[in-house]
Amino acid sequence: MREFYGTKLSNALMLGTAQYPSPAILADAFKRSGAGVATVSLRRESGTDKAGQDFWAMIRELGVHVLPNTAGCHTVKEAVTTAQMAREVFGTPWIKLEVIGEEDTLHPDTFALVEAARILSEDGFQVFPYTTDDLVVAERLLRAGCEVLMPWGAPIGSGQGLNNVFGLRAMRAHFPETPLVVDAGLGLPSQAAQVMELGFDAVLLNTAVAKAGDPAAMAEAFSLAVSAGQLAAIADPMEPRDMAAPSTPVIGKAFLS
Amino acid sequence: MNISINGEQIDTSAETLTTLLEQNGYANATIATAVNSTFVSQGERENHLLKEGDQIEVLAPMQGG
């Protein structure tokens, strides 16, 4: 597996921490899946109930890498300020950079994304940009200082799977040395396996696990799928062909007609 | 002076950001702050003087995808 800014992950599953039925189920999902990375966020904290403090204590107990996001940001300024605040709170230079450009699809504003990535990279951040499968944008992000790319599979929370397999395959071929993560849109473990079969380095998902009837079981299913896809990619899959080819040898077949 | 914390208007006598946070229940909390949309680090809070109309954001870890 390629490294993420010098960090080698033992498990290629990155899990979000939102929308679980309870903190205990969230923790169980991480334990059963062995996910190596937890995405987290920042929100307004009340001076009286301090909900964020308990959450942060629980995440630290999981012992996983923490990847803060800039979810909900729509401008370069918002995203950069949020990233600065996240670095101080979470104590990591990693930032999952989201700059949303359109509400119905949560399509990233790729122009603002590149600019924010440049500012943050120059400031020492290690940027994980949530982007599309656009190769030109990807190239710009790498030039801006990103060493990881995170194209979407489908719109966030949609569970649609991989809307553009061709685009993801092209991205893998075009950037053979760059760690690639499919972030968002996955609904089923089989889709995560497909991502890994394409030669990607990790998958990042949240809703498909958190909204499952049994989130911990689904997290484990995704983990198994990721491992299977990863092993399949290493095993060098056969090339598909248009016509049938008998797998059973014809030589030595009995003459019975 | 009148300022806002996380969108809520308050009247405060605090002169610095550190004092304001202590007076409003954030002492020893894991938080990050911004004043008028600009990040103010933990080390800068003590010397950051507040002024009328400042908009303070106090953020903490939260679930995210």
Image (spheres, coloured by chain):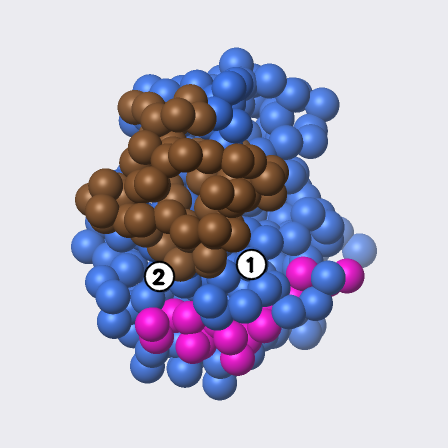
Chain colours: A blue, B brown
Earlier in the chain: of badge 2 and badge 1, it is 1
Residue placed at 64% from the left, 39% from the top? A207
Q: Position of residue A57 (x, y in %)?
A: 37, 21
**Is A254 contained in the magenta span?**
no
Asked if residue A156 lies left or right of residue A138, the reply is right
Element type at mark 2: strand
Q: CA distance from mark 2 to mark 1?
A: 15 Å
Amino acid carrying mark 1 in the image:
Cys
- Give the mark count: 2
Tell me the element at label 1. loop
What residue range appears in magenta? A104-119
Determine which residue is flagged by label 2: A127
Q: Is residue B35 visible?
A: yes
Q: Is residue A58 above or below residue A173?
A: above
Q: Residues within 10 Å of mark 2 (few under 14, many from 20)?
A: many
Observer-nearest of A39 and A200: A39
- x%, y% of residue A9? 29, 43
Q: Nearer the viewer, residue A36 or A240?
A: A36
Chain of the residue where label 2 is placed in the rendered structure: A
Q: Chain of mark 1?
A: A
Q: In this image, A141 relative to A44: left or right?
A: left
